[in-house]
Image (cartoon, rainbow, N blue to C red):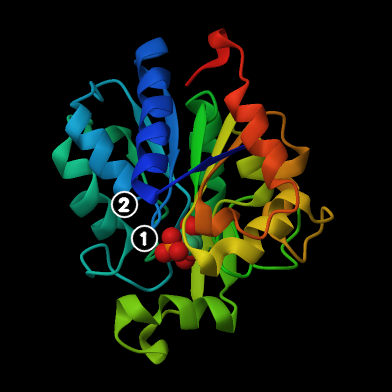
Amino acid sequence: MEVIIQPSAEAVAKIAARMLARQLLENPASVLGLATGSTPLLLYRELIAMRLDWSRVTTFNLDEYVGLPRTHAQSYHSFMWKNLFRHINIARENIHIPDGMAEDIPKCCADYERRIRDAGGIDLQVLGIGTDGHIGFNEPTSSLASRTRIKTLAERTRRDNARFFGSEDAVPRHVITMGIGTIMEARLNLLLAFGENKARAIAEAVEGPVSSAHPASMLQMHPVVKVCLDEAAASRLQRIDYYRWVYANKPAWQAI
Ligand code: GLP
């Protein structure tokens, strides 16, 4: 894991945007895994401003709420169109988001996995983290080998996401999410986190034991993970000085 600590969320977003831009430059037909929530918003804003060529890019989103029509303001379909897709030149047919209204959810999940495989796998996956350590919507005790499937949200996640829905009661109980096994197959994982309320989850993910009790900790088993944090999200890390020193001493050819 490479831990990159920046003075602000804006600075983190700029670095993350440079990584994505480089990926698209090296391979204009890249397959990207995308995330929702408040965390990637600044990154998406940066990417839009960069006016990159998305015409050959394929995307797969991590997750979607079950039971929300695409047109619902809080569906991840709506989120992605509002905050990224309608501002870039991506081809509609290259966009993939799990269908939360699917009648046959197991089939929809199996199809999603197949589509990722058929696209050649995910080159770069963007991740946020839940305050309970979830990635995608893989709540604590999710199988570390899990694939795309239906999950029931933890109470804490529903409470965290109530801010988007007006009340906790309005937050759906079920979601479709890529599994941890799916995320582990991405060639590069880029985990972003901002703010003090993510500090504990980040410390557990980066320095805690690998455990399904903290799903993001499984990323320790992945060969290429970049964890990009603002100061507040990094504040509970034990080895913070080491991470800063490593970043300051990167060989020139490794510069971001
Ligand atoms: C959400 C999403 C995750 C996201 C996390 C944190 O509910 N399913 O993909 O990373 O929880 O959300 P936020 O970025 O709003 O803090």
Give the percent coordinates (x, y) of residue 185.
65, 34
SS for dot 1: loop
87 versus 194 height, above or below? above
> Foreground: 158 or 31?
158
206 versus 151 height, above or below? above
Query: For the residue with label 1, is its CB less than 8 Å from the closest atom of ligand 1?
Result: yes
The residue sitting at the top extreme is: 253
Quarter containing the N terminus: top right
CB within 8 Å, label 1 to label 2: yes
Residue visible at 48% across and 36% down?
Answer: 115
- Residue kind at label 1, given as amino acid type: Ser
SS for dot 2: helix
The answer to which quarter of the image holds residue 24 is: top left
Q: Residue 216 vs residue 109: left or right?
A: right
> Foreground: 155 or 111?
155
Q: Which residue is mark 2?
A: 41
Q: Which residue is mark 1?
A: 38
Q: Does the image show residue 146?
A: no
